[in-house]
């Protein structure tokens, strides 16, 4: 099956073949590196089911000390593990085990970039998308063609598809507008240009780089192959497991040591929340989707409240009639309203995922998802909505269902 992510994967593969980065034959690649540009670009962005996630910000912590130039944050276990690595590195340096002539590795090991919230960024991006939408409508002189909510929604869908954009928060998290640093699992220890191949080569060949690798691995970190100054916490490592178990005892959250690596989803359940509304506790993300669409239309009819209809009167003189645009339709039945927006959600998610699924299969998947909603809505409408979205997402095959699990070895094909 061809998809947006498969196309990006293929393009990156071609680029990699014609412009390979520094050879790493002198090191064990699997042992030290993670290829988050080519193999695992969604590491920390999706859970083991492939559902897009964002970090619960109450679990972030400073990964730096007061004397560091930058105060940088990460998820709590990453912050603690990095401080251990920092302490070990600086001890080695003071003891003379590291070369003082190093270009990149001096007496201090400090994080310069880490977690920054993306929650408000989504709303800022939506404002930009709306502005571009209106410009597009005006450029194509389509204001008169959009007379009601339904024709407006079709215009939005076409625009999102043509411009390769997103509208849902799930689509935002999957996009390049959200940095991998926002997962809380990564830290940059140098502020460099990741597109500068010569700089990366110098970094890889630094005399202290092998020691840096060993210290990272010992403390639960891998190196981002494409950005060698970015360290990535490997949640499968024993050191990370021990730190997670230790920290969560303070929250009365127990992780079973026996099946820790077989139940990595629990890490995502504890530290992250799904932005795909597949459970009732995430229903607000569906309400947010509804609010975004309605907000777009209300803003549109405020800017363009009426259509100008030109007519000729009996004397062949031009006459302009102003026809007010219709407001958002009211639904007599709440169930009908949710069915309406569920179908829209399915349409936008299909656009965002970019699977070239044929209409017949898509209609079938949508139908069984709406059927799930119909079965459950009389008992609990929120649960009915979420179960319908879960049915749709699994059947359309979200990121991880289309390929192997991001945790189990990938590759997951998509944007970095």
Image: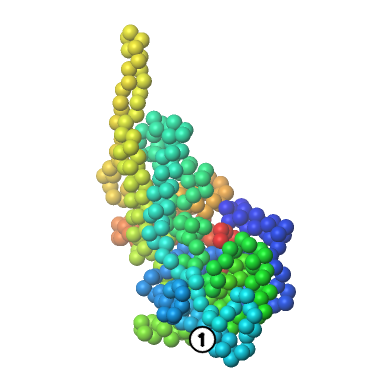
**Between 56 and 287, the one nearer to me in the picture:** 56
Quarter that holds the N terminus: bottom right
At 39% from the left and 49% from the top, the residue drawn is: 127
- Residue 355, given in percent of the width and then of the height, sits at 56, 52
Residue reaching furthest to the top: 315
Image quadrant where residue 107 sits: bottom right
- Indicate left or right for 353 with 306 as reference: right
Q: Is residue 359 above or below residue 402?
A: above
**Between 53 and 139, the one nearer to me in the picture:** 139
At 56% from the left and 61% from the top, the residue drawn is: 416
- Residue 280, given in percent of the width and then of the height, sits at 35, 63
Q: Which residue lies under the disc numbered 1?
A: 87
- Indicate left or right for 141 with 90 as reference: left
Q: Secondary structure at mark 1?
A: helix
**Between 112 and 413, the one nearer to me in the picture:** 112
- Residue 67, given in percent of the width and then of the height, sits at 44, 80
Image quadrant where residue 382 sits: bottom left
**Between 19 and 402, the one nearer to me in the picture:** 19
At 59% from the left and 83% from the top, the residue drawn is: 215
Q: Is residue 1 above or below residue 250?
A: above
> Can residue 261 be seen?
no
Q: Badge 1: how crowded within 10 Å, few (<14), some, or many (20+)?
A: some
Image quadrant where residue 248 sits: bottom left
């Amino acid at each position: 099956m061809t998809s947006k992510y498969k196309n990006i994967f293929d393009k990156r593969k071609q680029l990699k073949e014609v412009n390979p980065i520094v050879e790493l034959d002198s090191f064990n690649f699997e042992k030290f590196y993670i290829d988050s540009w080519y193999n695992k670009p969604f590491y920390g962005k999706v859970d083991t089911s492939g559902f897009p996630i964002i970090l619960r910000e109450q679990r972030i912590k400073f990964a730096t000390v007061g004397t560091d130039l930058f105060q940088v944050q990460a998820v709590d276990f990453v912050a603690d593990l990095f401080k251990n690595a920092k302490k070990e590195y600086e001890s080695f340096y003071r003891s003379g085990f590291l070369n003082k002539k190093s270009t990149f590795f001096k007496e201090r090991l400090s994080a310069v970039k880490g977690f920054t919230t993306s929650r408000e960024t989504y709303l800022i991006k939506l404002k930009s998308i709306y502005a571009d939408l209106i410009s597009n409508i005006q450029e194509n002189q389509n204001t008169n063609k959009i007379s009601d909510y339904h024709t407006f929604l079709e215009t939005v869908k076409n625009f999102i598809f043509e411009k390769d954009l997103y509208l849902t928060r799930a689509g935002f998290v999957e996009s390049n507008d959200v940095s991998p640093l926002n997962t809380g699992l990564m830290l940059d220890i140098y502020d460099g240009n990741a597109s500068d191949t010569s700089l990366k080569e110098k970094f890889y060949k630094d005399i202290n780089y092998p020691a840096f690798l060993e210290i990272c691995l010992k403390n639960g970190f891998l190196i981002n192959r494409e950005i060698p100054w970015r360290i990535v916490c490997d949640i499968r490592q024993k050191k990370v497991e021990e730190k997670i178990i230790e920290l969560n005892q303070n929250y009365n959250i127990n992780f079973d040591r026996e099946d820790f690596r077989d139940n990595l989803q629990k890490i995502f359940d504890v530290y992250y929340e799904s932005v795909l509304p597949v459970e009732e506790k995430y229903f607000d993300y569906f309400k947010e989707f509804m609010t975004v669409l309605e907000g777009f239309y209300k803003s549109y009819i405020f800017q363009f409240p009426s259509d100008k209809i030109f007519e000729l009167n009996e004397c062949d003189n031009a006459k302009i009639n102003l026809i007010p645009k219709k407001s958002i339709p009211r639904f007599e039945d709440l169930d009908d309203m949710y069915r309406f927006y569920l179908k829209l959600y399915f349409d936008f998610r299909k656009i965002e995922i970019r699977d070239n699924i044929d209409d017949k299969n898509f209609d079938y998947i949508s139908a069984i998802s709406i059927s799930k909603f119909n079965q459950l809505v009389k008992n609990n409408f929120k649960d009915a909505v979420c179960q319908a979205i879960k049915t749709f997402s699994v059947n359309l095959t979200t990121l991880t269902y289309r390929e192997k699990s991001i945790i189990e070895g990938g590759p997951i094909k998509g944007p970095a």
